[in-house]
């Protein structure tokens, strides 16, 4: 099997060529980690015109899943609507998605938000009103609005909104290829520029980061739950959704790290009981230290025991005595 090599940046479609290598490798090496529908979507992608393929990869590399058509200007995609129709035909994009008012506001400029206020609420606001205040005004009048096509919210809009349907699939591909999600498509560029190097690893069953689809799902679940907390959801709501311990050693380490990370967030939010609960369930080395420090703060006499080096005594007996 040919090795995956970063495409030269002199090729204007270098990003597409890199993505094609990842797709083909995953189809060859990890078909058991993909559903029949996912494999079909990838095979269909490989049969699209170059312009449609390039557009999809461009969208995958951008943030979010909703895009304004007037912001999609790529030299390698001369006919945008034709490329979008191709992607829509195979289920990789939606041309007229239903969107919430909040999602529409995130796509608009300040003056466009001001126009929406005038249109939907029939009120005038100062010309220098901040966009955040304009959005707050709109959402206060439509707090539970159902998703609707852009034409329903704003028939006079000078652009269309399209939705990327392949974001989750390409996130899964990236995870299967790199074995993590902190690396992304820019790794190929950095490698081509000589700014980083990777050791050559033979692709054997033992070298694969994931053996089953359930392991991929577990990693994605942990990542998404942590992201939801970082975006503002309450840890108490996310905590019951955390997966149970697993037998895969490196994934169990990842699960324990997420427990520790959630504990740190809870501690910073002064939810100390919740933080202790999360730390106690984590075998991450830092969770042990944070448990001691929290107990020390809550129960000052513990400091003397800590000075005597009685950490194990504290962890095994102190919580039981204090409960």
Image (tube, rainbow, N blue to C red):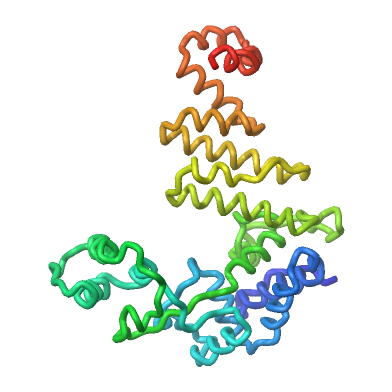
* Residue 39 falls in image quadrant: bottom right
User: In the rendered view of the protein, which quadrant contains the N terminus?
Assistant: bottom right
Residue 95 % position (x, y): 49, 83
**x 66%, y 54%: residue:** 180
User: In the rendered view of the protein, which quadrant contains the C terminus?
Assistant: top right
Residue 69 vs 142, above or below: the answer is below
Residue 82 % position (x, y): 53, 92
* Residue 88 falls in image quadrant: bottom right
**x 51%, y 22%: residue:** 293
**x 64%, y 38%: residue:** 256
Can residue 111 be spotted in the picture?
no
Image position of 134 (left or right of 41): left
Residue 309 % position (x, y): 62, 11
The total number of labels drawn is 0
Can residue 21 be spotted in the picture?
yes
Which one is nearer the viewer's eye here, 322 or 298? Answer: 322
Image position of 34 (left or right of 184): right
Which one is nearer the viewer's eye here, 190 or 307? Answer: 307
Residue 176 % position (x, y): 71, 61
Which one is nearer the viewer's eye here, 196 or 126? Answer: 126
* Residue 170 falls in image quadrant: bottom right
**x 56%, y 54%: residue:** 224
Residue 210 vs 151, above or below: the answer is above
Which one is nearer the viewer's eye here, 194 or 53? Answer: 53
């Amino acid at each position: 099997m040919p090795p995956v090599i970063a495409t030269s940046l002199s090729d204007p479609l270098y990003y597409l060529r890199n993505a094609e290598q990842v797709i083909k490798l995953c189809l060859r090496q990890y078909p058991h980690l993909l559903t029949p529908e996912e494999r079909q979507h990838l095979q269909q992608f490989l049969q699209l015109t170059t312009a449609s393929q390039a557009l999809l990869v461009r969208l995958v590399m951008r943030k979010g899943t909703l895009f304004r058509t007037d912001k999609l200007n790529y030299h390698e995609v001369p006919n945008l609507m034709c490329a979008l129709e191709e992607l829509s035909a195979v289920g990789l994009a939606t041309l007229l998605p239903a969107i919430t008012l909040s999602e529409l506001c995130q796509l608009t400029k300040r003056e466009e938000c001001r126009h929406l206020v005038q249109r939907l609420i029939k009120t005038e606001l100062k010309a220098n009103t901040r966009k955040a205040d304009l959005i707050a005004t709109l959402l206060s009048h439509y707090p539970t609005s159902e998703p609707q096509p852009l034409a329903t919210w704003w028939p006079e809009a000078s652009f269309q909104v399209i939705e990327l349907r392949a974001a989750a699939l390409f996130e899964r591909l990236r995870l299967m290829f790199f074995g993590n999600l902190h690396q992304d498509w820019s790794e190929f560029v950095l490698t081509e520029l000589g700014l980083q190097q990777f050791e050559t690893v033979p692709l054997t069953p033992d070298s694969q980061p994931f053996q089953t689809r359930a392991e991929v799902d577990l990693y994605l679940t942990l990542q998404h739950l942590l992201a939801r907390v970082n975006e503002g959801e309450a840890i108490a709501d996310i905590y019951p959704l955390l997966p149970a311990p697993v037998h895969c050693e490196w994934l169990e380490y990842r699960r324990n790290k997420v427990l520790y990370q959630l504990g740190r967030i809870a501690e910073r939010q002064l939810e100390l009981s919740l933080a202790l609960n999360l730390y106690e369930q984590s075998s991450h080395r830092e969770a042990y230290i944070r448990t001691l420090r929290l107990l020390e703060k809550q129960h000052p006499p513990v400091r003397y025991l800590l000075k005597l080096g009685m950490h194990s005594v504290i962890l095994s007996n102190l919580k039981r005595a204090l409960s």
